[in-house]
Amino acid sequence: MATLQEHLDELDRMVVGGTNIPQIRSQIAFIGREITALDADYARFIDAHTQSEQATAKALADLQTQNQALIAENSELKRPTLHNVKVTRC
């Protein structure tokens, strides 16, 4: 499959070589369709990227909330110290 640049180069050769008008117009129409398809792809990629960013931000916020809840839960636990641990000898 030829690239868009190759199609543009072909159009240039057609113009320089004196190709008849209908063939040149056909090549221009083809290039126009390719550009339209690329524009549509670009719009889909931007939409997908935006959705991905939003999902990532939500997941991060959820993890931060869970992390804060765990920190709060663990801070209520009594930590062992030399004063509140019974030492037994083996």
Image (cartoon, helix red, strand yellow):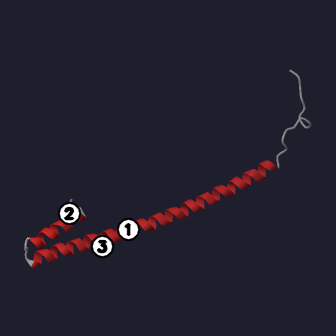
Query: Which of marks 3 and 2 precedes in the sequence?
Result: 2
Residue 38 image point, x, y percent = 32, 68
Residue type at tag 1: Tyr
Crowd tier of the residue under label 2, counting other residues whose Cα lies within 10 Å: few below 14, some 14–19, many 20 or above = few
Residues under labels 2 and 1: Cα distance? 20 Å
> Identity of the amino acid at label 2?
Glu
Q: Which mark is residue 61?
A: none
What residue does disc 3 label?
A: 36
Q: Are marks 2 and 3 in contact (CB under 8 Å)?
A: no
Residue lying farthest to the right in this orientation: 83
Q: Is residue 2 left or right of residue 47?
A: left
Q: Is residue 33 left or right of residue 10?
A: right
Could you give the CA–CA distance between mark 1 and mark 3, rounded to whole angstroms? 10 Å
> How crowded is the residue under tag 3: few (<14 C-alpha within 10 Å), some, or many (20+)?
few
> Looking at the image, is 3 positioned above or below residue 14?
above
Q: Are marks 1 and 3 in contact (CB under 8 Å)?
A: no
Q: Which mark is residue 6?
A: 2
| Element carrying mark 2 | helix
| Residue closer to the observer: 22 or 62 | 22
Tell me the quarter of the image containing the C terminus: top right
Residue at image point 17% right, 72% down:
27
